[in-house]
């Protein structure tokens, strides 16, 4: 039987850790060190975003890098773990829990909504509108985004 999202959130293996940027990674991310967070760490950052405020995956990466004294936070795992946190919170909500991680407040770069979150961009947009945010609709293949999202990022 596959793991639940909550089980994935708790599975940290050997994380967090900081690794040296080498080989192909250095072409993409430069020199220095890369902080790979645990899923729970990303969830805690997302959980800290108050109503009316927002955070982007890039901001989560900055927080992770600073916490671990690394040059950058891993773009891949931060995104994957944000998705896991969102789905785990959605599982909690479906079980009737009231205090869940406000996953809908976590945006992709440039304030874009995340089509991989529970219910896709429509569910995220609905929850953001309920908190007073304005949503700019799809443009071609670009997902919707939060208008003036920069003003609300913590």
Image (cartoon, rainbow, N blue to C red):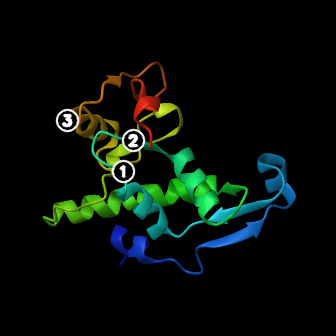
User: How packed is label 2: few (under 14 Cα within 10 Å), some, or many (20 or more)?
Assistant: many
Q: Position of residue 51 (x, y in %)?
A: 27, 45
Are the residues at dot 1 and dot 3 in contact (C-beta closer than 8 Å)? no
Cα separation, mark 1 vs mark 2, equals 6 Å
Q: Is residue 148 above or below residue 9?
A: above
Mark with earlier residue (1, 3): 1
Residue assigned mark 1: 49
Q: Which mark is residue 27?
A: none
Cα separation, mark 1 vs mark 3, equals 16 Å
The quadrant in which the C terminus is found is top left
User: How packed is label 1: few (under 14 Cα within 10 Å), some, or many (20 or more)?
Assistant: some
Helix, strand or loop for disc 1: loop
Cα separation, mark 2 vs mark 3, equals 14 Å
Q: Give the camera-side residue of 142 and 34.
A: 34
Are the residues at dot 1 and dot 2 in contact (C-beta closer than 8 Å)? yes
Residue assigned mark 3: 130
Residue at image x 33%, y 64%?
88
Residue at image x 42%, y 24%?
148
Is residue 4 visible in this depiction of the protein? no
Image position of 28 (left or right of 80): right
Image position of 87 (left or right of 127): right
Helix, strand or loop for disc 3: helix
Q: Which residue ends up furthest to the top in the rendered image?
A: 139
Q: How many marks?
A: 3
Q: Which mark is residue 54?
A: 2
Is residue 116 visible in this depiction of the protein? yes
């Amino acid at each position: 039987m596959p793991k639940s999202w909550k089980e994935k959130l708790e599975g940290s293996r050997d994380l967090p850790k900081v690794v040296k940027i080498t080989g192909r990674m250095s072409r993409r991310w430069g020199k220095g060190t890369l902080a790979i967070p645990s899923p729970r760490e990303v969830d805690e950052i997302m959980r800290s975003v108050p109503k009316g405020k927002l955070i982007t995956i890039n901001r989560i990466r900055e927080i992770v890098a600073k916490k671990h004294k690394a040059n950058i936070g891993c773009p891949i795992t931060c995104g994957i773990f944000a998705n896991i946190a969102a789905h785990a919170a959605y599982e909690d909500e479906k079980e009737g829990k009231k205090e869940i991680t406000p996953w809908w407040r976590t945006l992709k770069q440039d304030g874009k909504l995340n089509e991989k979150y529970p219910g896709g961009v429509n569910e995220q947009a609905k929850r953001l509108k309920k908190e007073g945010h304005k949503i700019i609709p799809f443009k071609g293949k670009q997902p919707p985004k939060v208008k003036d999202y920069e003003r609300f990022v913590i």
